[in-house]
Image (tube, rainbow, N blue to C red):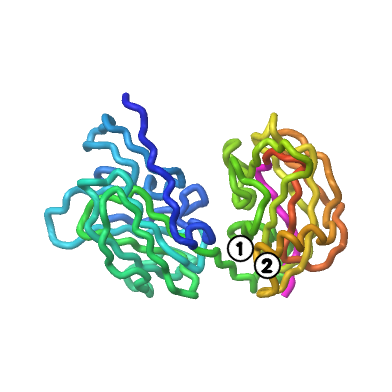
Amino acid sequence: MTDAIVAPNIEGPDFTRNGLNLADGSLGAEVTQVTDEFFASRERMLNPDQPVFYPDRFDDNGKWMDGWETRRRRTTGHDWCVIRLATPGVLMGVDFDTSFFTGNFPPAASLEACYCPDGEPGESSDWQTLVPAIELQGNDHRFCEIASEKPWSHVRVHIFPDGGLARLRIYGKPFCDWSALLTSGPVNLLALEHGGDQVAWSDAHYGEPRKLLRPGRGINMGDGWETRRRREPGSDWCILSLGHKGVAEHIEVDTAHFKGNFPAACSIQAACVEVGESTAQSLITQSMFWHTLMDEQPLTADAIHQFTELKDVGAITHIRFNMIPDGGVSRVRLFGKPVS
């Protein structure tokens, strides 16, 4: 069989870098309703990996395509599907990716959304149009900004009248209702689903720091933050923002799958940064002088490390995770109590 052709990474607008893809199947996003998926099944459209194309791969229904593809419509109407986002979020933009769909892409698409966090929406739900019908091209990316400050839990993508999308990426910031969590026990204040995010880092040659905040344990060595081999003095670091201001109680550092390249040690600094007081660039300089939350601690290969001996630095909003000197870490979790 001919080797797979991998779609190139295309640099998109700012929202593709500043937002999290909330339609990422590996984070829990799922297509819950679909009109048709004859040629290519729904879950492929939410695969976080780049689309691939095998020139000579076919299955019982025809050409194998890496995405969601419906049959040729011979009736009125059009195809659509409903996606439950990985977590409710304030949406920033969408990428309609038709990579390798050349004679079978939809001529147009649109996007609706609704907020239904406790169940699945129906026709009676309050669906709002976020992206009116727009033209698509084959083997292309159509990036569209979304101007909405409301949180949404589900999106409905319409393709007119039929065809296929390689990927649908919905970028945004996770929305968390902290009113219930303020009186609960310790929660992971760094979790992606709670609004934790990456801010800045020294190096991300093999994987960005945002992967540290994903749910569950890493699935392989590529599912974590890993830097190049350091050939100069110093150590690598990343700055992470908590989803909510809180008081840290214990730290968990997981080096799952990192066996010959785990850091020798790590330490954590922390600070309380009020909204609007800093930029990502200024935080890099400020973070060098933040208070120490956790002294340097040794790490081992492919293991979960629990640290409960933390210094009292009060309520914090950001941490600087220092990886000494370099290497890879799969997950970092900061459990604590959110404060109003």
Residue 240 falls in which quadrant of the image? bottom right
Q: Which quadrant does the N terminus fall into?
A: top left
Give the residue number, with chain letter if any, for mark 1.
Answer: 195
Q: Residue at x 83, y 57 (%)?
A: 293
Q: Residue at x 74, y 71 (%)?
A: 339
Residue span colored magenta:
329-340
Q: Of residues 183 and 233, which is closer to you in this image?
A: 233
Give the residue number, with chain letter if any, for mark 2.
Answer: 244
**Amino acid residing under circle 2:** His
Q: Of residues 86 and 226, which is closer to you in this image?
A: 226
Q: Residue at x 62, y 59 (%)?
A: 197
Q: Residues within 10 Å of mark 2 (few under 14, many from 20)?
A: many
Q: Residue at x 76, y 49 (%)?
A: 322
Q: Which quadrant does the C terminus fall into?
A: bottom right
Report x, y in % for residue 335.
74, 57
**Amino acid residing under circle 1:** Gly
Q: Is residue 284 magenta?
A: no
Question: Relative to 106, is 112 on the left or the right?
Answer: right
> Overall secondary structure of the magenta stretch?
strand
Q: Is there a contact, CB below 8 Å, between mark 2 and mark 1?
A: yes
**Visible residue check, residue 159:** yes
